[in-house]
Image (cartoon, helix red, strand yellow):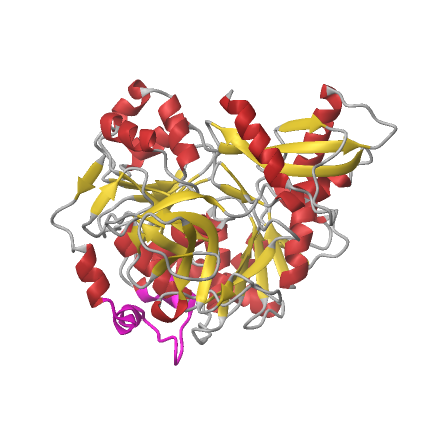
Amino acid sequence: MTEMRAALPRYEDAVRRFRIEDEIARLHGDPASGINAYVECCGRYTGENRLALRAISAGGGLREFSFDDLADMSGRVGNMLKALGVRPGDVVAGMLPRIPELVALILGAWRVGAVYQPLFTAFGPKAIEHRLSYSKAKLVVTNPANRGKLDELENHPRIATVLGAGDTLPEGDIDFRATIAAASPDCEPVMRKGSDLFMMMSTSGTTGHPKGVPVPLRALLAFGAYMRDAIGLRPDDIFWNIADPGWAYGLYYAITGPLQLGIATTFYEGAFNANSTYDIIERLGVTSLAGSPTAYRLLMAEGPEAALRVKGKLRVVSSAGEPLNPEVIRWFDAHLAAPIHDHYGQTENGMMVNNHHGLAHIVRAGSAGFAMPGYRMVVLDEAGNELGPNQPGVLAVDIANSPLRWFDGYHQAETPAISGGYYRTGDTVEYEPDGSVSFIGRADDVITSAGYRIGPFDVESALIEHPAVNEAAVVGVPDPQRTEIVKAFVVLAPAYEGSEALAEELAQHVKKRLSAHSYPREVEFVAELPKTPSGKIQRFLLRKAEVEKRKG
């Protein structure tokens, strides 16, 4: 399936005309002389009675907040943070569901020049502890459903809890709602430089713990460009990005991006399912939807009849997190009458290669698209040479010729992916003759399941904590719903025997220690693991055997 859109700016023209000075001019502030993320995403739009947030509770109640409302709430949060000793450059962490207080916390932290760190609500104590240890967060804001995890940490920062009706404040905690209600909404934004941080993210690798990804304020230039050119967001759109703000795609493009453009975003506190998604699209009149292929496959699984009530309502649909299956594209066209486009990016760089909704170019099913204007993407061989069409290699960013690039390296850690003037993504691709990028596979062992990136090291480490486990190796194996699922190969301690009950016990152990998405859905007990002579586990051999087994 190939599509060409008319009546849009031509992609070639956008690339040719791109000037970083023009992107800076779209900002309210200036990365060189002074900029504040709260001002860019809220303050500049006050006084216009302009809608900023549609928030639907788990029970279905809808509340709407203007930019003025968010300015008031974030000002109170900012004054609370200052009273607690939070200073510009300090980290404030949030472990909250998709509720209005989350947006107020993020904007309030930015307002006083602090750095916001997301903690996914499904994280277990081990995952939380590592992230807080490298960020040195001064405060964690959470809710009663997640508060107990912090008690399992050896050390943790001050805690503020967002209480619900009937909840009791844990001893020593700050009552978030009561404290901000008593605070003044007047809070002068602290101006920072474009090189100063405003987010501290994390990303999983194949070895070691998750690494910190510092996000400087100049990344706002790239976030805004993605919303404009790839999402194709318009002032009259009803926009909903269903990704969780505990992860990059949700924080970058469900909160920061739309608010930066002065366009309202949508929150749904409840868990994802197909029926509630269709309900919200119909109820709000959603015109621009963003999410992962896993979510879209679950919509498909409900069948054409369930989709009928919103057919033709979605103007555009954007997909990210893993390659978009061509069958999803065809199904959305047939049963939702909505163009769904694949977008490619990473926590470290944001989105870099897209089938752009806002620019006219050929869209080929199965292709990741074209480099976003402001990035020059190349395909490299092992020696670092740039390759031509139909030659597989590693996708990389040409640093000197990518003015929107903002990632300079991991937090207090080496970044071997940056060398020779390039940032190597670790993903294997090839260029097509028309200049589009086709995804082939990952060059590392990171598992992509339901749009989440899962590092095997974390899961293996959690497994080994269990007394029954001597050794463990974790790989991703093909799954029609989730792209991949986590499978663990376990060598047991001598006193234990493998059983279905023990396999379930190990899975639940990991689920409790890490998160609900990263536990092994399959556990196989083995006598030994394949290793190199130096003792490194050869996960690729396990993965290859599983792929072959499933083909048979």
Residue 66 visible, this angle = no
Q: Is residue 216 above or below residue 518?
A: below
Image location of residue 173, percent across then percent down: 68, 54
Q: Is residue 474 left or right of residue 347?
A: right
Look at 22% across and 48% down and name the residue there: 236
Where 461 sits versus 17, above or below? above
Q: Residue at x 30, y 57 (%)?
A: 372
Q: Is residue 31 magenta?
A: yes
Q: Nearer the viewer, residue 449 or 543?
A: 543
* Res. 459 in view: yes
Q: Residue at x 65, y 61 (%)?
A: 134
Residue 209 image offset from top left, x and y in percent: 65, 53
Find residue 291 and report its horizontal and vertical position in percent.
39, 40
Query: What residue span does the magenta drawing correspond to?
Result: 18-44
**Nearer to the camera, 57 or 179:** 57
Residue 202 coordinates in the image, percent (x, y): 56, 55
Residue 113 within the segment the image draws in magenta: no
Q: Is residue 410 left or right of residue 492?
A: left
Seen from this angle, which residue lies furthest right?
495
Point out the image quarter for the N terminus.
top left
- Above/below status of 288 relative to 211: above
Residue occupying the far bottom of the picture: 33
